[in-house]
Image (cartoon, rainbow, N blue to C red):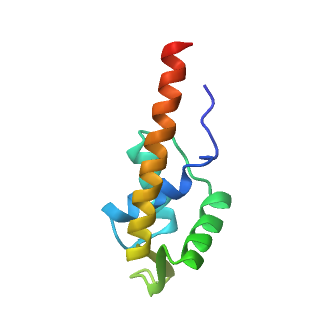
């Protein structure tokens, strides 16, 4: 079975949830956390993740800060805001409703 390249409709939820558990992560660490936590079932590609991070930052759900790593390279660290926590709750509620509806269809079909 081919692994999905995108997480249509759930990327925001996954990013917000990861950042709620592990604040101050850079983009690559977020991609890795999604992959590892899902046991290599879900993958967030750079082409989807970084635009989503910028969009979420503009919406005020997350904030970002450039830091200098020990290696001398810069990294953009992301963390959840209070508005982001509210959005996470809304996204989780929406996901529960959708997954319950899908499960009903699967059981009744």
Can residue 81 be seen at all in this image of the molecule? no
Quick check: 93 left or right of 9?
Answer: left
Tally of marks: 0
Position of residue 100 measured from the top left corner of the image (x, y, whole percent): 45, 32
Q: Nearer the viewer, residue 81 or 78?
A: 81
* Residue drawn at 38 percent across, 82 percent down: 70
Residue at the (38%, 74%) spot, across then down: 24
Residue drawn 57% across the image and 69% down it: 53
Figure quadrant of the N terminus: top right
Q: Position of residue 78 (x, y in %)?
A: 45, 74
Pick the quarter of the image with the C terminus. top right
Left or right of 56? Residue 37 is: left
Q: Nearer the viewer, residue 10 or 69?
A: 10
In percent of width and height, residue 94 lies at 48, 48
- Image check: 49 left or right of 61? right
Choose between 108 and 61: the one closer to the eye: 108
Task: Determine whether 2 is above or below 6 in the image.
Answer: above
| In the depicted structure, whether residue 102 falls above or below residue 67 | above
Outermost right residue: 47
Which residue is outermost to the left? Answer: 21
Q: Residue furthest top?
A: 109
- Residue 3, by quadrant, is top right
Residue 3 in view (yes/no): yes
């Amino acid at each position: 079975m081919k692994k999905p390249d995108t997480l249509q409709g759930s990327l925001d939820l996954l990013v917000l949830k990861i950042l709620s558990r592990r604040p101050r992560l850079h983009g690559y660490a977020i991609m890795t956390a999604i992959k590892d936590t899902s046991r290599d079932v879900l993958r967030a590609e750079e082409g989807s993740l970084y635009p989503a991070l910028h969009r979420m930052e503009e919406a005020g759900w997350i904030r970002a800060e450039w830091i200098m790593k020990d290696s001398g390279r810069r990294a953009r660290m992301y963390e959840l805001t209070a508005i982001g926590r509210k959005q996470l709750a809304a996204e989780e509620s929406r996901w529960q409703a959708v997954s319950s509806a899908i499960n009903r269809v699967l059981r009744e079909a």
